[in-house]
Image (cartoon, rainbow, N blue to C red):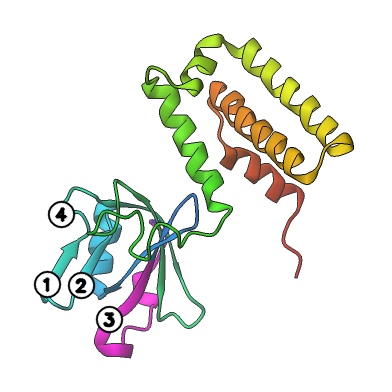
Amino acid sequence: MSDFDAQTLDWNKADGLLPAVIQHWRSGAVLMVGYMNLNALSQTLQSGKVTFWSRSKQRLWTKGESSGNFLHVKSLHADCDKDAILVAADPQGPTCHLGAASCFGDTSAPPLAFLAELDSLVAAREVERPQGSYTTRLFASGLRRMAQKVGEEGVETALAAVVENDEALLGEAADLVYHLLILLRARQLGLDAVVEILQARHPARH
């Protein structure tokens, strides 16, 4: 974030205001859209919290300043014309003032984004250990049992692929992915680490 140069943006367009698209840093879901001027972007870079220029209030406005639902900046990117900003952020609570995770509604995220949400939920369960939770029981069972469950689910998935219908295969595959997330988290690893390896193995081809 420190290497993002605000001065390279085209502030001459739209009276010095550029649209800023806020995206969940893990799931990729679009959380909201606001506007930044140079001062708002500078404060965002300095504080690490997304700050806009409020056109209605005519002042700088840090998202979450009243609700506590801040957007913590992970990275910033300018588009090819240097007149729009993409902000990857970690939301602390719902982004929308109506209580939804996104200002575009909770169903606006792409389907695969749920994997990141599930990974985050598993990480929270590992710390909080709520009573009555199956995930809590798995973490309490120990690493060997968690590894055993992944093995069992892998075998069941393979068998379903050979002798069961598509619905059964998908159900077993879902169980396998879920238990794999549990096992990774038990080793303090997450799905993002797996994705990094896949990306390294399959670099973008142009």
Count of numbered tags: 4
N-terminal label among 3 and 4: 3
Q: Where is residue 169 in the image (x, y as percent from the top left)?
A: 76, 39
Q: How far, Cα to Cα, is label 3 from label 2?
A: 8 Å
User: Front-most of 155 and 39?
Assistant: 155
N-terminal label among 1 and 3: 3
> Which residue type carries mark 2?
Trp
Q: Residue sitting at 45 percent across and 62 percent down?
A: 108
Q: Helix or strand or loop: what does disc 1 sit on?
A: strand
Q: How far, Cα to Cα, is label 3 from label 4?
A: 21 Å
Q: Quadrant of residue 11?
A: bottom left
Q: Helix or strand or loop: what does disc 4 sit on?
A: loop
Magenta residues span 2-21
Whether residue 100 sits left or right of residue 147 in the image: it is left
Query: Can you say whether 1 is above or below 205 in the image?
Result: above
Q: How crowded is mark 2: few (under 14 residues within 10 Å), some or many (20 or more)?
A: many
Q: How crowded is mark 3: few (under 14 residues within 10 Å), some or many (20 or more)?
A: many
Q: How far, Cα to Cα, is label 1 from label 2?
A: 6 Å
Whether residue 53 sits left or right of residue 178 in the image: it is left
Q: Where is residue 129 in the image (x, y as percent from the top left)?
A: 40, 19
- The numbered disc on residue 17 is 3
Q: Residue sitting at 22 percent across and 59 percent down?
A: 97
Q: How far, Cα to Cα, is label 4 from label 1?
A: 13 Å
Q: Helix or strand or loop: what does disc 2 sit on?
A: strand
Q: Helix or strand or loop: what does disc 3 sit on?
A: loop
Residue position for label 1: 59
Q: In which quarter of the image is residue 190?
A: top right
> Which residue type carries mark 3?
Leu
- The numbered disc on residue 53 is 2
Q: Contact (CB < 8 A) between labels 1 and 3?
A: no
Q: Residues within 10 Å of mark 1 (few under 14, many from 20)?
A: few
Residue position for label 4: 65
